[in-house]
């Protein structure tokens, strides 16, 4: 566990120290977009926070590779090297978009390239869990499904990045749940606790923790596409590497929920934002508009309209992410009707709090709530 704690603090420290420099670079290169009508802030905020995250990832991976017990993670497989390569590519792509606003087609091509780099270096889904066993994938199926999962996660996290601190907090919480699962699974299986999935989750937690002090409302730096796409890629890749650690015959003897969890957990973390994305597509299509046309009817905008401040709305989304991701892990590892009942009560209580209009904010408009940022 000490190795993981050190890696976490290295990732968080490097990211935190680099954010200010990246904000200055954003001003130098023009990565400071003007405010839009749907934004909750009034002054232009620099992007390129993802470059600080990239520095945190690379620094943490470098330190981890020199730790005595962690060296095996880098020596036994090429997963860690594949992650580093893909992360660099996706962050450079995102940085280019932060500066020059690339077309959707160019970004999609870059995302396919990053996902393809994972596949050619051996980071890919090997099987899919089914209630009555597993379905072993052939090479073509592995490549296609891996690319779909990675590209989907990249765009889903990018979509989550709608309020100050939202994406970093949600992904960091999901990474914590994923680390708990990967670590406890190794302990219960009597295997080594130094694994690529757990290392990836710890690095992901670290860069999110290091970036959040600059990104909590009112944000001083945005992560931009360079950061959002980096987080999405790491979230998906960590899940994929975990599925590759178990042989299909071992999976057949395991609980269905345990084997399904690596694929479900990333989706659970971003379940609410993803549902919001689907509703936005339906809403805009029914109105005769482009599915990609911006509006102010997303879930976080509705929370502001109810009367929550920006910080309160973000914290509500954090708690939802913690409840969903932690609940999924608890159900898979513990189970039982007591677990289901407690989770049901927690969901109902959080739902009531989410929909309740705060007394002190009854007369505030969404714009004023976003301006002062009271929690």
Image: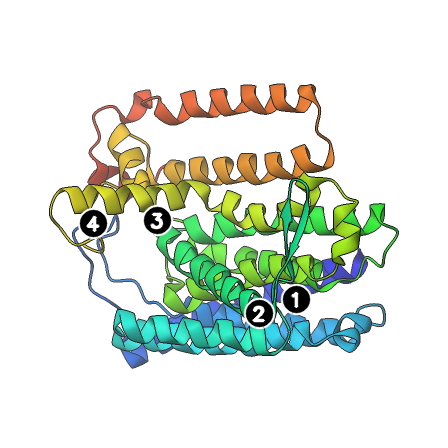
Vertical order, 123 against 328 (above or below): below
Q: In this orientation, does residue 18 appear?
A: no
For label 1, the SS is: helix
Residue 342: image quadrant is top right
Disc number at residue 102?
Answer: none
20 or 303: which is nearer to us?
Answer: 303
Q: CA distance from mark 4 to mark 2?
A: 31 Å
Q: Earlier in the sequence, mark 2 or mark 3?
A: 2
Between disc 4 and disc 1, whose residue precedes?
A: 1
* Residue corresponding to mark 4: 38
The correct choice, above or below, for 332 with respect to 42 in the image is above
Residue named by callout 2: 56
In the orientation shown, which residue stands out farthest toward the left? 288
Quadrant including the C terminus: top left
Which mark sits nearer the N-terminus, 2 or 1?
Answer: 1
Q: On the rendered structure, is 371 left or right of 230?
A: left
Q: Secondary structure at mark 3?
A: loop
Q: Earlier in the sequence, mark 1 or mark 3?
A: 1
């Amino acid at each position: 566990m000490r190795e993981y704690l050190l890696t976490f603090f290295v990732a968080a420290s490097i990211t935190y120290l680099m954010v200010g420099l990246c904000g200055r670079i954003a001003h130098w290169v023009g990565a400071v977009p003007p405010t839009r009508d749907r934004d909750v802030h009034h002054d232009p905020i620099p992007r390129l926070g993802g470059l600080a995250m990239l520095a945190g990832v690379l620094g943490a991976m470098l330190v981890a590779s020199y730790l005595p017990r962690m060296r095996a993670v880098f020596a036994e497989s090429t997963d860690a090297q594949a992650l580093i390569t893909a992360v660099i590519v996706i962050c450079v792509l995102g940085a280019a978009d932060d500066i020059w606003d690339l077309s959707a087609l160019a970004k999609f091509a870059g995302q396919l390239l990053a996902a393809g780099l994972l596949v050619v270096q051996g980071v890919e889904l090997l099987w899919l869990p089914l209630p009555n066993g597993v379905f072993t994938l052939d090479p073509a199926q592995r490549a296609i499904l891996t690319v779909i999962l990675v590209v989907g996660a990249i765009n889903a996290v990018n979509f989550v990045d709608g309020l100050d601190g939202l994406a970093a907090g949600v992904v960091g919480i999901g990474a914590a749940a994923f680390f708990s699962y990967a670590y406890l699974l190794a302990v219960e299986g009597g295997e080594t606790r130094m694994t690529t999935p757990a290392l990836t989750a710890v690095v992901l937690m670290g860069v999110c923790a290091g970036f959040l002090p600059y990104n909590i409302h009112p944000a001083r730096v945005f992560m931009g596409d360079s950061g959002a796409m980096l987080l999405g890629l790491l979230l998906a890749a960590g899940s994929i590497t975990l599925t590759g650690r178990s042989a299909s015959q071992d999976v057949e003897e395991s609980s269905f929920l345990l084997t399904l969890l690596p694929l479900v957990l990333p989706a659970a973390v971003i379940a609410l934002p993803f549902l919001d994305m689907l509703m936005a597509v339906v809403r805009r299509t029914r109105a005769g508009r482009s599915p990609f046309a911006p509006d102010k009817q997303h879930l976080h905008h509705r929370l502001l309209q109810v009367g929550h401040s920006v910080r309160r709305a973000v914290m509500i989304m954090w708690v939802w992410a913690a409840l969903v991701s932690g609940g999924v892990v608890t159900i898979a590892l513990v189970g039982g009707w007591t677990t289901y009942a407690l989770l049901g009560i927690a969901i109902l209580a959080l739902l009531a709090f989410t929909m309740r209009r705060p007394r002190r904010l009854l007369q505030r408009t969404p714009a004023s709530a976003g301006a002062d940022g009271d929690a």
